[in-house]
Amino acid sequence: MKAAVASLAALALMSACGPRQTAPAAPPVARHLVLITIDTLRADRVGAYGSTDVETPTLDRLAREGASADGSVQVPLTRPSHVTLFTGRYPAEHGIRDNVSPGLAADVPVLAEILQSRGFATAGFVSSIVLSRQSGLARGFDTYSDRFEIGEDDARFLNTIQRRGDLPTAEAVSWLGQQKEGKRHFAWLHLYDPHDPYEPPEPFASHYAGRPYDGEVAWSDTLVGRLDAVLAQTRLQKDTLLVVTSDHGEGLGEHEESVHGFFVYETTLHVPLIVRGPGVKPGHRLQVVARSVDVLPTVLELLGLTEAIPRVSGRSLAAAFRGESLRDEPTYAESLVPLIHYGWSDLRTLRLGRWKYILAPRPELYDVQSDPGELRNLAGVEAARARELRAGLEARLRDEQAAARGTPAPAVTLAPDLLEKLGSLGYVSGAGSAVGLAKGADPKDKIGEYRILNGLMREGLIGLREGRFEESLARFRAMAARGIDSFELNYYTARALMGARRWREAAARYEAAIRLLPAYGPAYLGLSDARVAGRDLAGALEAVTRGQRAAPSDVRLIEREGELCRRAGRPDAAALAYERMVKLAPRDALARVRLGELYRDMGRPREAARLLREAVQIDPAPASYWNSLGMVLGGEGDLAGAERAFREATSRDNANVEYTYNLGLAILRQQRAGEAALQFRRALEIDPTFRPARQRLAEARP
Ligand SMILES: [Zn+2]
C-alpha cells in the first residue's frame, strides 16, 4: 500500500498547486452522520441537478437546506465505487476493482471503523448482495443488515440479488429512533432500487409509465424523505450531517450503453452529492468537482475529526461546503470490465475542469462544458490538451504498475494472468514509444458484441436456474466460441455441468475458474461438490483445504472441511475444523450449531449444550437451533430445559412435525401425560402419517 500512495503525489503534481487551505477557527461541527447511497443515480435525473420531469422533492429540499456538488465516481461499479467512498482511496490502492472479488483487506482503514473507534454507534443497511459482509465493508459497523433470501442454487446475476428499499429504510429509521442523545452515531443506508431491473412500486409505476428508471428515482426520493422525517421527529436533525450520493449513474441507451460499468462517460460517472448539516452553507453549489475519494476526508472534517483522517488519496472539501472556493483537482476514473470479463482494452479517463480525456485504443477528448453528451471527439483537434491529459494518466498508470509489483500478493484481488494483461498494455513499456498505448479491442467497437454476450450470459443463467442445463450449456458454449474465457463463464459452465451430472467435466471447469480468480471461495466448494459426486472424498477435501489457503476468511470452506471429515468417519478432524470456524467467526451462530451437534454425536453433551446455548443467544431466529439445543438437554436429563427449548422451536416454526413431537416427548417424560397428548395430536394434524406420534399418543392415554 505504501507504493500506491505515490500516485497521489503524481496527481497532486499535475494540478498547479494552489495556496494551502487553512481551516477557519472552530467552524461548527456535526455530532452525527447519516450517509445515504442511492445506487445507480444519474445526476441529471434529480431536480436540483436540472431535471424537469422526475419528481425529487426531498433531494431538492436537501440541496436548498444544505449544499450540493457535482459528484464524480472513480469507477462505475457498485462494489469498487462504494469501497472508494468508504476508504478515500482509488481502486488500484484498495484493491477492489470488480463486483466479483474477495473482501477488502483488513488493514485498509474504513469510515465506519474510524468512527466506531471514536465512540460512535454504527449501523449499515444494504440492499445488494454485492455489498454483503463478504465485501469487507461491514468492518466497523455494530449492526450490519445484509440478509438476502437466496436459494442454494441461485443463478441470478450477482448484482440483481436485491431487496426493495423500504425494508432497509424501515430498519434504519428504527435504529435511528433508538439512538440516545449522549452518544454519537453513524448510519449508512444503501438503496438499490434504481439499479436494473427497473420495477418501481405504485403509484410510481403508473406515474412514470414507459420510463421505469425515473420512477425508481422518484420512489427512492420518498425513502430519503422517510429517513429525514425521523431525524426531524427525534430532534437529531440539527446535529446530523446528512450526506446523499451515489456510486455511479446509468447509460440509459446513450453511447449504446444501457446500464453501467462498461464505458466511462459522464452518464455513469456524474452523480449527485448533497450535504446538509452544521458547517454547511445552505443553498450553496460547489464550483469544484467532488470525487468519491474526497468524501471520507470531507465528512471527517465536518464531524470535527480532522485528526482522524487516515492516509487517503482524496482531499477534504469541507471548506468548499462552508462556501469557500477551491481549485479543481484532476478526476480519475477507470473501467476494467472490458478487460477483466472480455479480454478487450480497459478504459481510463482523466478530467480537469472542462476537459476530459479517455485513454482507449482510439483515444477521446471532450469539452464536457460545451458538449455534455460527449458526442464530439476533439482528440485530433485539440492535440496539445490531449497530450497533456494523457501524460497525467500515463504517470498514474506507471505508479499503479509499480505499486502492483511492490505488493506481495496482488493476486488476492486480480488473477495473475490478468495482472499480466494489465502489465502488457504498453503503459509502462520503458523502451517503447508513446504510440499504441491501449492494447486489445477498443470497447467502443465492441459494444454490440458486449450486448450479445451479455444476452447469452443472461439466457444461460436463466436456463441454469430453471434446470434446463443443456440449453444453458449451449449458451455458454456460444460465448466461448466468441473468444470468451472469463472466470464467470467457467464457473457457471461448471454449475451447468453439475446439473447435467457431468462431474468430471464440471471439476475441470471449476479448476479453470480457480486459475482465473484464485481467491473466490465458492469455486472451491463447487469443485469439492463435483469430486464428492464422483466419489472422490479425498479429492474433495484437497479442494477445500486449497481453497482455505487462497481465501482464508471464507468460513464456508472450513465448514465444508468439517462436513467432509464427518462423512469420512473422522469426527476428531471434523471437530478441529469446526473449532477453527467458531474461532474465525465468533458471531456466527451456525458455526456453533455445527460444532455443538458434532460434540453431541461424539458423546460430549456438556460442551454441546454450551455451544448451542451460545448459538441461540447470537441468533435466536432459526427454530432448528432451538430443536438441537432441546435434544442435547433432553439427552442430558434436563427435561424442563429441553421443554423450554422445544417450545421456542415450535413457536418459531409451528408446522414442523419433529419439533412438536419432541416437545410432546419432553412433557411426557415429566409425567404430564394429558399435556403431552395434546402435542402428539398436533403433530398428527401436521403430518397424519408420522408414526412415532401415534405410538406415543397411545402411551400418553391414561
Ligand atoms: Zn451500483
Image (cartoon, rainbow, N blue to C red):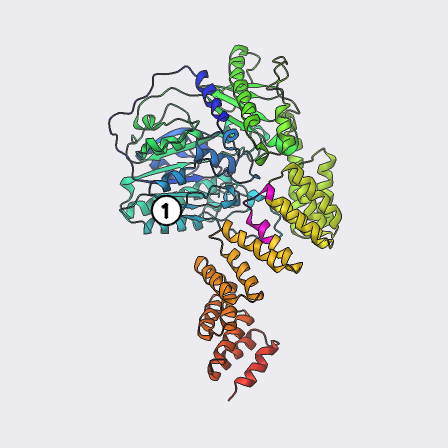
Where does the magenta region start and end?
549-560
The spot of residue 152 in percent (x, y) is 60, 53
Residue matched to label 1: 226
196 lies left or right of 431: left
The spot of residue 684 in percent (x, y) is 56, 77
Dot 1 lies on which element? helix
Between 677 and 47, the one lying in front of the other is 677
Please name the predominant secondary structure of the magenta segment in the image: helix
Q: Residues within 10 Å of mark 1 (few under 14, many from 20)?
A: some
Q: Is 554 within the magenta?
A: yes
Q: Is 261 within the magenta?
A: no
Q: Is residue 560 above or below residue 671?
A: above
The spot of residue 496 in percent (x, y) is 70, 48
The spot of residue 672 in percent (x, y) is 46, 82
Q: Amino acid at mark 1?
A: Arg
Residue 142 visible in the displayed image:
yes
24 lies left or right of 342: left
Between 466 and 103, the one lying in front of the other is 103
The residue at the point 48 percent across, 46 percent down is 127
Residue 352 visible in the displayed image:
no
Q: How many marks?
A: 1
- Quarter where residue 302 is shown: top left
Q: Which residue is most to the top?
A: 384
- Quarter where residue 597 is shown: bottom right
Q: Which residue is most to the left?
A: 25
Judge: label 1 CB < 8 Å from ligand 1: no
436 lies left or right of 238: right
Q: Is residue 505 above or below residue 617?
A: above
Between 67 and 498, the one lying in front of the other is 498
The residue at the point 29 percent across, 42 percent down is 237
